[in-house]
Image (cartoon, rainbow, N blue to C red):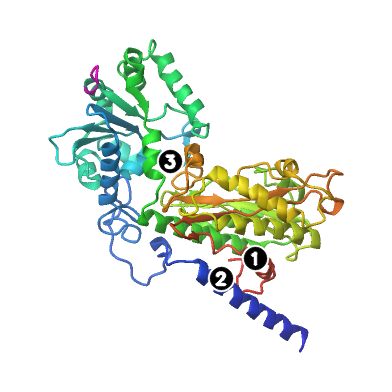
Amino acid sequence: MSTGSLRRSIGNLCRQSYQARLHVRSYSASPSLRTQPRTKLASSIKPAQLGQPSHLSHPHLIKPGEITPGITKEEYVSRRKKLMDSIPEDDAIVVCLAGNIKYVSGEIFYKFRQASDFWYLTGFQEPDAALILRKSPSSPNGYISTLFTRPKDAYQELWNGPRTGLSSSISLLGMDEAEDIQNFPFYLRSSISSDTVVYTSDPPNQNRSNQSRSRQRSWASYFRNNSKSGSSDTYDGVISKAYDKSPSSIRPLATRVFQLRYIKSPAEQRLMRMAADISGTAHAKTMRFTQPGRSEADLGAHFEYLCALEGSERPAYVPVVASGPNALIIHYTANDQVLVDGEMVLVDAGCELHGYASDITRTWPVSGKFTEPQRDLYQAVLNTLKSCTVLCTENNGISLYDLHRKSCEFLLRELRQTTLSQSLDLKDIDRLYPHFVSHPIGIDLHESSEGRSKNLVSGQVITVEPGVYVPPDNAFSKHFHNIGIRLEDEVLVQEDHCIRLTANAPLEIADVEGTCQGLLGIGPY
């Protein structure tokens, strides 16, 4: 058999193997409507009459009955009801704030992204808004929902695009009432009595990545420190005054909403699979795009372009494109050096689609073929990933803390089968593998860490991301020095099994090499 024939045969076998694995590990998820080429599109209204896409203006994105792509009005209403039903106090209100536009400098603004909890409860995509939910036993749902937003304004809309306005917000979002955002602090002040318990959003610029206890302490400190200086005509002033009178009556909303966001609905699961499909395919095509002499920035730009072309609104986070020794820096985001033959490149990148994040890490050889040391370490991390993934079921009764401890044990076992070091123990693993193995993911890339001690439950989506980072230290064999490998999948937890949402991203050594070398029919575009 000629060399060319042999290469084609190997390529066909690899392609069949890769496609078979995709079939086993996947479940059906509709593609993004935004990306389907059509010869005839449904008629739409231009310009849009509302401040966000609707079925009338964006039929390629929004189906009848949906507020945001894939999520219906009924689901958003149900979320608000579940939240209010979970609050035990009879005299309780929920105050949830929308995001504000952020500015690069002067009047130059960043692309707006809605505050996550506000998005989850409303689906409303405009800034400068607020939601108040007030318990009311006489109302059909047991509570009254009031949205505060900007009214219609012809002059402002000429410059910045349409606003939904007050009356349309009620019908669009399923609210009971809508008020001018200017009235928000006065309405809030009148809603708080001496017995009212207020669950409210984090203060502005609150760092939600902190551990829950320290975050709650700083949350309380914020309102305590503002109680004397805050104006009663502002949200901060109203809440701070109430906190000053009764600190126990002002409570963080994020903890309550997290209990709902923790479990993903079937609609959310479909959206997260779509986001993972887009990101996984972009990883595969970026592997094929890679070659010595390209820059890390080239790969990052290529990945983001591919995701945007498939309907992604934005990257879920600043991507890591770390070649060679740069991979030893966990959050390397400079992405400004050149790929060298013989190195590997670690790419941690994912898109955000219709409000939901994806998070995938793959590591591959710049030349398209692993060296023996690279292959040995890659297989060790891959085996660790697989061993951890099968544990991600409700019936296994493990928490993320348990999963991390297991990942350390698995990685130690795998590395002992290599020539990395003559003696390895768990202390070495702490040095070689310094980060946590998992985090919940959804609307936020890193959803609250409050659930690390809870057992995994069906409907939860988490990442599994073991890694190994070998410093240039004589404690480790020289031919492994400066090799950094991380492999990260998203996993949907089920009762007795789990589903890899990120199956589109090549993972096995044969698939990675075959993709890089163009043997699997996957091109760079």
From the image, tell me which residue sits under label 3.
112
Region in magenta: 191-195
- The label on residue 21 is 2
Q: Position of residue 374 (x, y in %)?
A: 76, 58
Q: Residue at x 37, y 14 (%)?
A: 230
Regarding mark 2 in the picture, which secondary structure is present there? Answer: helix
Quadrant of res 225: top left
132 or 382: nearer the viewer: 382
- The label on residue 508 is 1
Q: Position of residue 50 (x, y in %)?
A: 28, 47
Amino acid beneath label 3: Phe
Q: Is residue 91 visible?
A: yes
374 or 276: nearer the viewer: 374
Alpha carbons under labels 1 and 2: distance apart: 10 Å
Q: Position of residue 413 (x, y in %)?
A: 71, 54
Q: In the displayed structure, does residue 175 sit left or right of residue 354? A: left
Q: Do residues under tags 1 and 2 come within 8 Å of each other at their CB atoms? A: yes
Marks 3 and 1, the one that precedes in the sequence = 3
